[in-house]
Image: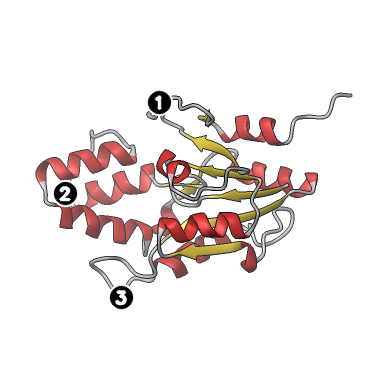
Amino acid sequence: MVIGIDLDNTLICYDASFHAAAVARGLIPATSRAQKAAVKAAVLANHDNATWTTLQGEVYGPLLPRATAYPGAADFLRHCRASGHAVCILSHKSRVAALQPHIDLRSAALGWIQSQGWLDAPAGLHCDDIEFLDTRSAKIDAIARRACELFIDDLPEVFAEPGFPAQTTAFLFDPDAVHPVMPGLRRFTRWSEISTAVCPPTLA
């Protein structure tokens, strides 16, 4: 099976890094909830959108090493490798930050993937398995071009995009269970659940 996976907020968890960065810059109180959506709401409640966009550029760029993989994500990659599934990472990510053109977001993301050891065995990804796309529609084209039989993303909008391949099974990764259940879309809150669905344990 060919499995495509989104990167930001699907494999990479930014909750703690967004919270720490916003607190360090005096944008939110330390008592605020350490969850990306909550941080965004708190920042935008008291600051303009440019402040949030700048914070995003920092967290997705120079502060990216502080982000963590979601629990179970690395295990999933290893299970896929052991089960003979091909995995690719397809990310809608601009090359540079919107308000900070000196920040190379793609280089930062690739560096983070390398730091996780995912380009080595047992995860076994190769640089050719990773694509950064300029637009969401380009991401959909990449899913079709790579003939992904399964795609995993945190945004239901991706699966509703015109041209999303009808033959591609859609798995929504929704760790905070904030999205409603949608017809034809399987929702998971944990990577361990996805691992069981894709690579079920062998019965003795």
Depth order, front residue of 114/100: 100
Depth order, front residue of 128/104: 128
In this view, the residue farthest toward the right is: 204
From this view, report whether residue 10 is shown above or below residue 58.
above
Callout 2: few (<14), some (14-19), or many (20+) C-alpha neighbours within 10 Å? Answer: few
Residue 9 image position (x, y, % from top left): 44, 45
Residue 67, visible in the rendered structure: yes
Image point 69% across, 36% down: which residue? 198
Residue 15 image position (x, y, % from top left): 37, 42
Residue 116, visible in the rendered structure: no
Residue 100 image position (x, y, % from top left): 26, 69
Answer with left or right where residue 94 lies relative to residue 39.
Answer: right
Give how far apart the Cα atoms at labels 3 and 1 are. Answer: 38 Å
Label 3, secondary structure: give it.
loop
Q: Which residue is mark 1?
A: 180
Say whether disc 1 or disc 2 marks the residue closer to the N-terminus: 2
Camera-nearest label, 3 or 2: 3
Say whether disc 3 or disc 1 marks the residue closer to the N-terminus: 3
From this view, report whether residue 145 is shown above or below residue 11.
below
Check if mark 1's residue and mark 2's residue have beta carbons within 8 Å.
no
Disc 1 marks which amino acid?
A: Pro
Image point 49% across, 64% down: which residue? 132
Residue 102's disc number: 3
Q: Which residue is mark 2?
A: 26
Callout 1: few (<14), some (14-19), or many (20+) C-alpha neighbours within 10 Å? Answer: few
Disc 3 marks which amino acid?
A: His
Label 2, secondary structure: give it.
loop
Image point 28% across, 33% down: which residue? 33
